[in-house]
Image (cartoon, rainbow, N blue to C red):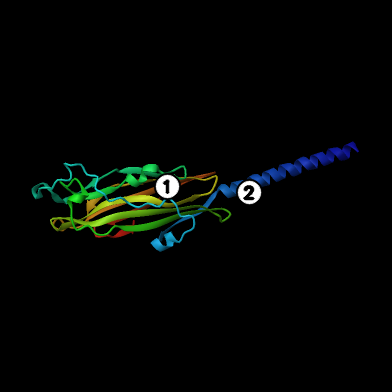
Amino acid sequence: MKRIFVLLLCFGFQYSFSATESTQNEDAKYFKIKSYKVAELTEQEVLNMPGLNNTYTPNYVSNCSDDGSKDAEPSNVDLDQVIRWGKEVWKIIQDNKAVVDVESVTVHALPSGIYCWDQLATWQMPNSKYYQVTYENTYGIEVIDVVYRVTYSYGGSFHEKGKYLANVSVAPAKIDVMWGFKFESSVKVPFTLNVGSATDPVAGIELNIHWSVKSLNHSEQSLSLFVDGQGGISQL
């Protein structure tokens, strides 16, 4: 009888150990990233999404100082030299949430000698593009769904010359991250340049959207975009 009890106890321990090991393996599969993809979406596709949150409406009220808002002297303006105004790097998602002050971060690509975008004329209606980043785990479950909204104004000119950029911004239109995963993201502007000619300049801005995913493993990716003063935007 004692021998039977010992055998049952050993069997129960072995079963418990096997069940625990199986559960741990299943947990590891859930928290392990298998694949990710980036897709460009239309505005209608984004608006039809369930769980849309963190929407962002850019504010185009001029925040220039009194000195910067004065009319610029043509002799002090170098149309060929494009200068970035605004931050070079900023964070937009931290701990699966949009950063509070993300709406205030914009970048401008203006000619040298111009200190505020409202010193230029012929601005076109703002344009927006949407990019979706999704991740799947080894079970094929979509564990991360983030949509970025890139917004910009284009076509600004000085005395009817040039095409420049203003109020270029990147903000999350949707953040859906399942428990056990951590998503963080930032934006960097590596450079601005003139992609036109000296007499007919066209401003260009590169936007590098970087993000990281942490769970059992760590993954980092980025999306590089190029926006120009004629209203075009493309992936690099």
Q: Residue at x 63, y 47 (%)?
A: 25
Q: Position of residue 45 (x, y in %)?
A: 43, 62
Q: Residue at x 43, y 60 (%)?
A: 47
Asked whether, in this view, residue 184 is left or right of residue 191, the answer is right
The outermost residue toward the left is 75
Amino acid type assigned to the residue bearing label 2 in the image: Glu
Q: Residues within 10 Å of mark 2 (few under 14, many from 20)?
A: few
Q: Position of residue 113 (x, y in %)?
A: 15, 46
Q: Is residue 210 visible?
A: yes
The answer for how far apart the CA atoms under marks 1 and 2 are is 26 Å
Of 175 and 7, the residue lying toward us = 175
Q: Position of residue 84 (x, y in %)?
A: 24, 46
Q: Earlier in the sequence, mark 1 or mark 2?
A: 2
Of 159 and 57, the residue lying toward us = 57
Residue on which disc 1 sits = 211
Q: Residue at x 14, y 58 (%)?
A: 160
- Dot 1: element: strand
Residue 26, disc: 2
- Dot 2: element: helix
Amino acid type assigned to the residue bearing label 1 in the image: Trp
Q: Quadrant of residue 140?
A: bottom right
Tell me: residue 94, above or below residue 34.
above
Residue 185, disc: none
Instruction: Say which quadrant the C terminus sits in.
Output: bottom left
The outermost residue toward the top is 2
Tell me: residue 45, above or below residue 19.
below
Asked whether, in this view, residue 90 is left or right of residue 163, the answer is right
Q: Residues within 10 Å of mark 1 (few under 14, many from 20)?
A: many
